[in-house]
Image: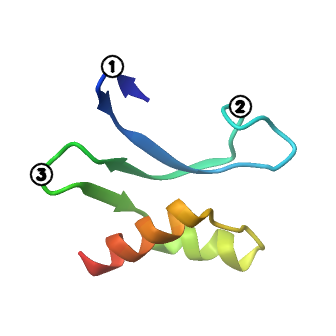
Amino acid sequence: MGSTKKPHYRVVVADSRFSRDGRFVEVLGHYHPRSSPAMVKIDAERTRHWIEKGAQPTDTVRSLLAKSQAQ
């Protein structure tokens, strides 16, 4: 998402059968790397719910979760 040289990202739950930028199940949060300091807003309760159901976070999302818990 975002525009040229102004990125921001959504953290979503996606089914592995759909394309990378395709359909998703739920938006869990947002990441704005250009703000100072970088803003990470992720719903911890919903994230925990999906991980308990078997969702596997990517390496990038795993590091964002660690950052959001530190805030």
Along the polypeptide, which appears first: circle 3 or circle 2?
2
Residue ranking furthest to the left: 36
Say the numbered circle drawn on residue 22. 2
Residue 57's x, y, as percent?
63, 66
Of pointers 2 and 1, the one earlier in the residue sequence:
1
Residue type at numbered disc 1: Thr
Q: Earlier in the sequence, mark 3 or mark 1?
A: 1
Name the spot of residue 4 as percent of width and height, x first. 33, 19
Residue 42 location in percent, x, y?
Answer: 41, 62
Amino acid at the residue labelled 2: Gly
Q: Residue at x 63, y 74 (%)?
A: 49
Q: Secondary structure at mark 3?
A: loop
Task: Give how far apart the Cα atoms at labels 3 and 1 are.
Answer: 18 Å
SS of the residue at dot 2?
Answer: loop
Report the quarter where the N terminus lies. top left
Residue on which disc 3 sits: 36
- Left or right of 66? Residue 28 is right
Give whichever of 33, 12 is nearer the camera: 33
- Which residue is drawn at the image coordinates 34% and 78% (left, top)? 69
Residue occupying the far right of the picture: 17
Q: CA distance from mark 2 to mark 1?
A: 21 Å
What residue sits right under mark 1 in the picture?
A: 4
